[in-house]
Amino acid sequence: MYNPRFLSSQMCSSLILDSFCLLVLLCIPAVLTAKCPQQCVCDQIQLTVTCVNKNLTQVPPTVDEITVKLDLRGNDIQELPTGSFKHTPYLTHLSLQRCNIRRVKEGAFRGLGRLVFLNLANNNIDILYQESFDGLSSLKQLMIDRNRVEEIQPGAFTQLGFLNLLSLTHNQLVYIPNLAFQGLQNIKWLRLSHNSLNYLDIEAFAGLFTLTRLSVDHNELQFWMRLTRLDMGYNPMTYLGEEVVSMAKLTHLFLDHMSLQDMANTAVSKCPSLVHLGISHNQLRVIQPFSEGSPNLARLNLAGNPIYCNCYLRPLREWAIRRKVKLMGTCGGPAHLSGENLEAVHPTQLRCQSQEAMLKAEFEEATRVTPRPTAEPENKVKCPANCVCEAETHHSSCENRGHNKVPRGFSPNTRLLDLRGNHFHYIPSNSFPGVTQVVSLHLQRCKIVEVEGGAFSGMKGLIYLYLSENDLSSLSPDAFKGLPQLTYLHLEKNRFANFPKGAFKLVPSLLALHLENNSLTRLEPGIMTGAEGLRALYLTGNAIEHVSPRALEEANDLDTLHLGGNKLKDVPTEALSKTANLRDLRLSGNSIRWVGPNAFQPLENTLKELYLDNMGLEKVSVQCELISLGPGLRSLFLEGNQLEEVPDFHSLTSLEVINLADNPLMCDCPLLPLRMWIEKVNLKVRATCANPPELRGRKVKDVHVFKACPGGESLPAVPTARPPKATNIGNQIQSLSVGSANGLIAGHIYGVSRTDALL
Ligand SMILES: *[C@@H]1O[C@H](CO)[C@@H](O)[C@H](O)[C@H]1NC(C)=O
Ligand SMILES: *[C@@H]1O[C@H](CO)[C@@H](O)[C@H](O)[C@H]1NC(C)=O
C-alpha cells in the first residue's frame, strides 16, 4: 500500500536528518496525509481525531498512533474490550459520551498511561469492575455521570492515584461499600449527586485525606457522617435537631432545597469552623439566633424561605448585627416588608403590631433624627458607622446605605470594599487613606460625576476598580494616580462621549478596560497612548461611527476588541492593521452590509474568533482567502444577516464553531461549495434555505438540488420529500468551549461574588 509518510520518512532517514524530518512531517500535514479512519475528521496539527455521531460499533482500529485527543461521542460501541486503545498510547483526552456502552471490560484502557481526561457520561454502564480503569496512571478527571451504575466493586479505582475529580452523578447508587474509593490518593472532589444513596458509612470515605469537597445532594440521605465543605441540599429532611451536625473542620455547609420547617438553635454548634451556612429554599418562617459554638459564622443564606419579618425575627437580626453575620434572603411578609433584604431591615422595624401603628412609629422615629445605632464590634474590626465589616473575610460593605461621603475608618486589612449604591457625586483626592490592601473596590451606582486627581492614591494593592453606572463624562489625567497594580477597570454605563484619552498613563498594569454602553462616537488617533499594555478593550454598545486609521496605533498587545452594537458601516481594516496580536474581534450589530476583499488581512495570522452576526450583511467576498480568514480561525459567527451566498469555507481548517442561522440562503448551484464543505466537516453549521420558495426552511444539508449541480455528483442521496419546516430552526449560538484568548482575561471577574471567591 502506498504510504506517503512511510516513504518520506525513509527518504529522510537516508539523509540522516531525523529531527529535520520529524519537523517536516509535523508541519506539512496537508501534503503528507496520515491515516485517518474514513468516518472521522483528523486534525494533524493538533493531533486530534473526531468521529462524532457516526454509529461506529467499535473503536476505529486505524486511528493514527500519534493522536492525543480522540473524540468518539455519539456512537454505538456497546462494549469496550480489553486493550481497546492499545494502538494510541499518546492519548491525553478521550471522549466516549453517548456510545451505548454497557460494559467496560477489565483492562479496557490499559496502555493509556498518559490519559488525563476520560469522559464516559451518558452510557449504560451498571457495574464498575475491579480492573475497569487499570493502566490510567495519569488520569486526573473521570466522568461517569448519567449511567446506571449501581455497583462499585472494591478496588475499582485503586490505580487512579492522580485522579482529582471523580464524577458519578445521576446514577443508581444506593450505598457505597467500605473502601470503595481506595487508592484515590489525590482526589479533591467527589461528586455523587443525584443517586439514591440512603446511608453513608464513615468508612466509605476512609483514607481520602486530600478530599476537600463532597457533593451528595439529591439523594435520599436521612443521616450524616471530616470534611470542610458538605453539599447536602435536595434531601427530604424537615427538621434539624440539636447538635445534629458535628464536624470539627467543616467550613461550608449547604442544606438548601430541602423541606426544613424548623431547626434547633444548637443544630450546628458542634461545627466550630463553620463560616457559611446555606439553608436557602426551605420552609423556614422564623429562626432563632444560634447558640454559641460557631464563632466564625460569617454568612447565613436564607434566600427562598418564607421568612416572616416581625418581632419574632428580631433576635436573629440583632444577633446577626452584633456578630457581623451576613444574612442573605428577603422577607416573605408582612406585606409592607415583603421582598425587603434581611440586611436592610433594621431591628426596630421588626415588630408585632398593626401596620398603621407601625408606620406611625416609623414616621416619629424618622422625625426625631436620632443617629442610627451602629453595631458594636465584639471581635474588634475597625468599621465606619453604617457599614458592615467582616473580620474573617476582610470584606467591608456600605452598599446602599445612603452615604454622601466616602466613609473612612476601615480596617487596614480590608481586601474588598463595597460602596455601591451611595450618593458620592464626586470622589475627592485621597479618599481612601489607610486601606492599602484593598484588591477590589466597588463604586457602582454612586452618581459620580468627577474623580479628582489622586482620588485613589495609596491603594497599592488595587486590582479591580468598578466605576460602572455613574455619570462620568471625562477623567483627569491623574485620576488613577498611585494604582500600580490596577488591572481591570470598569467604566461601562457612564456618559463618556469622547474616549477618556490620557487617563491611563499612570496605570502600567492595566489589561482590561470596560467602556461598554457609553456614548462614544469616534475613536481618534492615539486613544491607546499610555495604555500600551492593554489586552482587552470593550466598547460594545456605544455610537461609534468612525475609527481613525491611527486609533489603535500603540495597541501591540491588544488581544480582544469588542466593537459590537455601534454604528460602523465598514470593517475598520486600517485601524486593525496596527493590532498585531488581535485574537477576538466582535463587530456584531453594526450596519456593515459588505465585507470586501482583504477586510481582515492584517489579522490573518492571529484572529481566532470573529463575530459578524446581526449586521445586515448582504455580501462577503466569495472566497475566504479574499477576506483573509485562514486556518487559524476557530469561531465564525454570521447569523442574522442577509446573506444569500456565503464564502467558501474550505480554507478555515481549524474551525470549531460556525453559525449561519437566519440568513436568506439561496439553495442553488452557487451554494454548492458550502454544501460540499458541510459534507466534509463535522460541525453544526445551522444553514437553512430561504429560497427557492419550495425549499424554504429546509436545512442546506437535507435538500437534493446540489446533487444535480456540476461537481455535486458525489454527494449522498437525500431522503426525498420531507415536509418543509415553517420557520427557521436553531438560531441559538452553539456554545462550544473555544480556546480562550488569554488565561488572565478569560478568568476575568465581573461581579463582587466572584471576586469574593478569589480574595
Ligand atoms: C445512525 O443510526 C441512526 C438510527 O439507526 C440513524 O438515524 C442515523 O442516520 C445514523 N447515523 C449515521 C451517521 O449513520
Ligand atoms: C449594555 O446595555 C445592554 C442593554 O441595556 C445590556 O444588555 C448590557 O448588559 C450592557 N452591558 C454592560 C457591560 O453594561
Image (cartoon, rainbow, N blue to C red):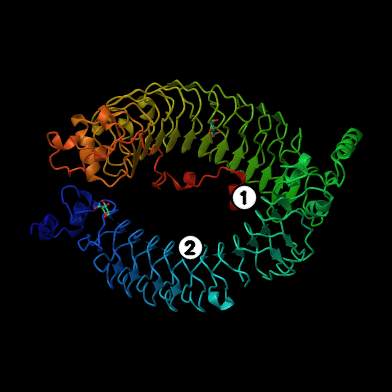
* Residue at horizontal 48 percent and vertical 44 percent from the top: 745
The image quadrant of residue 393 is bottom right
C-alpha distance separating marks 1 and 2: 28 Å
Q: Is residue 587 left or right of residue 348?
A: left
Instruction: Specify few, some or many for label 1: CA neighbours under 10 Å numbering under 14, 14-19, or 20 or more.
Output: some
Q: Is residue 668 above or below residue 237?
A: above
Rendered location of residue 615, percent (x, y) = 39, 26
Q: Is residue 631 left or right of residue 579?
A: left
Q: Nearer the viewer, residue 526 or 628?
A: 628
* Residue at horizontal 72 percent and vertical 49 percent from the top: 412
Rendered location of residue 293, percent (x, y) = 76, 66
- The residue labelled by disc 2 is 169
Rendered location of residue 596, percent (x, y) = 29, 24
Rendered location of residue 456, percent (x, y) = 66, 37
- What number of labels is visible? 2
Cβ at disc 2 under 8 Å from ligand 1:
no
Specify whether residue 410 is in view: no
**Sequence-first disc among 1 and 2:** 2
Q: Is residue 9 above or below residue 691?
A: below
Instruction: State the SS at label 1.
Output: helix
Q: Quadrant of the N terminus?
A: bottom left
Q: Is residue 554 left or right of residue 366?
A: left
Q: Nearer the viewer, residue 312 or 645?
A: 312
Q: Is residue 76 above or below residue 367?
A: below
- The residue labelled by disc 1 is 756
Instruction: State the SS at label 2.
Output: loop
- Looking at the rendered structure, the kind of residue marked 2 is Thr
